[in-house]
Image (tube, rainbow, N blue to C red):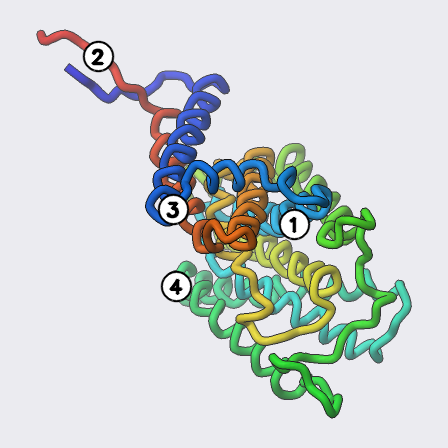
Amino acid sequence: MITWEHRESVGWQTSLKSIGIALALTLLLTFAALWLTTGMPLEAFWQMLTYPWQAERALTQWGKALNPAFYLSLIALGLSISYRANVWNIGAEGQFAIGSVFAFGAWLLLGMPNGLWAIPIILLSGAVGGMVWAAIPAALRTLANTNELLVSLMLVYIGAQFLFYLSNGPWEMSAAMKPVPTRTESIPDSLLFTSVFSQGPKLHWGLVWGWQVYLVVTALLAFTLLGYRLSVANQSKRAERFAGFSPVGTIWIAFLFSGGLAGLAGGIFLIGDTGYLVDQSNFLQNYGFTAIIVAFLGRLNPLGILVAGLALGYLEGGAGWLQASGLGDDSISGIIQVIALFCTLGTATLVTHRISWRGNP
């Protein structure tokens, strides 16, 4: 007889086993997806796993993998703070967009400077923009008891339309020969983050500085009262009040932290990858939505999120390589993300429960 038993204690070995099972299932189902969507599944699978070494310039390919990995990890780290506190912010995509808008707006308000002194102000403005946009569902949740999941999701589309309005309206490029699609003026090259390596244009210094922010927030979660507060909030509101913490304050902390990191990522993306604002279909890269998957793949743990972000970033590069080589299209990336999420969530139950085999009584 098969029984489903609760584990009395959970060690790191158990968690490692569940992750290993999830990885094996993900690879197996990924191969099945490639078999169904391409004519050469073995070739496509091998190319996707080894694409940096298939290209002539491996450093460039690694840059393309590490670039999205940074944005996914930084945004997912902020979202993990919300989810630890049972606050469901799924509007990071909109907070990323508004962070970019605030960053570009700060550059305009400063008089369109070209000095390096403006970079910290631009990035800080991006973080503030994300916090402002995240404050809306926080206020509605605490004052009107609305569902923050729905409100934060709806604000994504409002933020995207606001981005479209500004880039095609008040902030539209004033040159006689406007590019297609219409966009804003470009931030001067002196303010744009340069590449770390001459052959890796996707790996710029903004990512390097952003990783330091990631480490600082990780330290705050591990060694300060913030991490303890979130762990208490994850239990129940009653336990939170008993520990002397305000549930309302925790909601605000969760939203402002997650929104601020998403907005900061938007500011870095603006002056590191594009240099201008354009409509949402050409500017937004779905980092905010994919970061939700990264947060859960990493089990809301900063180290796990970093590994999951690197894995999905590598996957993004692999999907692009398959498209360039004619073996598939970039839609396979979304399919594999869903496969990885379901495999991870499915095997997560093995951390707290185990299958036991017993003879008939």
Mark 4 and mark 1 lie on one chain; the one further toward the N terminus is 1
Q: Disc number at residue 357?
A: 2
Picture quadrant of residue 166: bottom right
Q: Is residue 188 above or below residue 11?
A: below
Q: Is residue 177 above or below residue 109?
A: below
What residue is at 65 percent from the left and 50 percent from the top?
Answer: 64
Of the residues shown, which amino acid type is indicated by label 1? Lys
- How far apart marks 4 and 3 lie (CA) works out to 41 Å
Q: Which residue is mark 3?
A: 39
| Apparent side of residue 3 relative to residue 302 in the rendered image (left or right) | left
What residue is at 63 percent from the left and 57 percent from the top?
Answer: 260
Q: Quadrant of the C terminus?
A: top left
Q: Position of residue 10 (x, y in %)?
A: 43, 19
Mark 2 and mark 1 lie on one chain; the one further toward the N terminus is 1
Mark 4 lies on a secondary structure that is helix
Q: Nearer the viewer, residue 41 or 243?
A: 41
Q: Which residue is mark 1?
A: 64
Q: Position of residue 248 (x, y in %)?
A: 50, 54
Q: Quadrant of the N terminus?
A: top left
Of the residues shown, which amino acid type is indicated by label 4? Leu
Characterize the local packing of mark 3: few (<14), some (14-19) or many (20 or more) Cα atoms within 10 angstroms: few
Q: Which residue is mark 4?
A: 150
- How far apart marks 2 and 1 lie (CA) works out to 47 Å
| Apparent side of residue 81 relative to residue 150 in the rendered image (left or right) | right
- How far apart marks 1 and 3 lie (CA) works out to 26 Å
